[in-house]
Image (cartoon, rainbow, N blue to C red):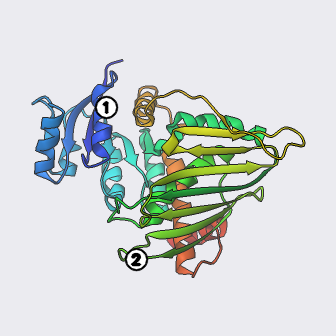
Amino acid sequence: MPPVKLAVLGVGRWGVHLLRNFLAHPHAQVVAIADPNADRLTAVADDFQLAASIQRSIDWLQVLHTPNLEAVAIVTPASLHEALIEAALTQKLHVLAEKPLTLHPEAARRLCELSDRQQRQLVVDHTYLFHPAIQQGQQQIPQLGRLRYGYATRTHPAPIRQDVDVLWDLAIHDLSIFNFWLRSRPIRVQAQAQSWRSDRADLAWVKLEYPSGFGATLHLCWSNPDKQRRMGIVGDRGTLIFDELDSAVLRWLPSEGEVRASLDALSFAQTEPLWQVCDHFLACIQHNQPSPTSSGWVGAELVQILAALTASLQQDGAWVAIEDWQQAEVRKAE
């Protein structure tokens, strides 16, 4: 098959990594990049020694009309996702969107429906779902026995995003991993938060409850001096731990009667998750089949959960039932 002609909209901190991977991929041909910062465009073009034939534009929408364009990667502030994704799908372009898909559940659902009607693929860059350690971890869950609880800590001092709060920036990662590992979604959620460094929440404590009764607690913060990326699931026959900073996924399976047991490091392929995202997106295009891992519908589901967590914050940390809240949102939109 000929390479997919695509454009990258947004070449900031994360966009340049997508650009790097697409430039190196044999099934992709980057034909355009866009960013409102003209100096940034010039710097990126110089850094990657882009061919003169690759269009550069400060106008997002102009790039969508590039001749023979087939797909776009949208790596812009989250507030712009809805309009740009809708415009791209309307042009019958395939779309890879940075997380979160949108900031509103109804908009996310509408974009998924548009993608289905246009028969174009909408994939969300939930990078952790393509991490070999996370994929290996899912296979270990049955060995843990009856699951008791889960936990996650995701903190750092920077960067602080200006378009969303700490919930929408960080919680989405752990939500996507827990849902992937458990092959389920929460039925109710709770969130409490504080703000120190901005008018947005930069510390949040989140609780999730799943249909099985399994519960998880998330600690998310932009104000910690140390960076942490660690999560785990505890069962009555073992524990699974993913420590990203140690590049390790660990399993603890104690023998009968043992009080202590060692953690076994599990092996997994050392491939860049973002490369896997790009490769997966291109395969979805070439076969014109929805992503079984991170489709627009998966992204929309995570947006619904994040919106419910925001509702919990607005209700002083009250538990919010996902289905009840979702039905209310549907009635409101009708």
Tell me residue 183's x, y (percent). 67, 45
Is 278 located above or below residue 40 in the figure?
above
Q: Look at the image and tell me whether residue 276 can be seen.
A: yes
Q: Within the image, what quadrant is residue 158 found in? A: bottom left
Query: Is residue 326 placed above or below 124 in the rendered structure?
Result: below
- Which amino acid type corresponds to the residue marked 2 in the rendered image? Trp
Q: Residue at x 36, y 17 (%)?
A: 1
The residue pinned by badge 2 equals: 196
Does the image show residue 134? no
SS at badge 2: loop
The residue under label 1 is which amino acid type? Phe
> Is 66 or 149 nearer to us in this picture?
149
Residue extending furthest bottom?
316
In the depicted structure, whether residue 300 falls above or below residue 285? below
Q: Determine the residue positioned at 69% across, 39% down.
A: 263
- Horizontally, residue 248 falls left or right of residue 257, namely left
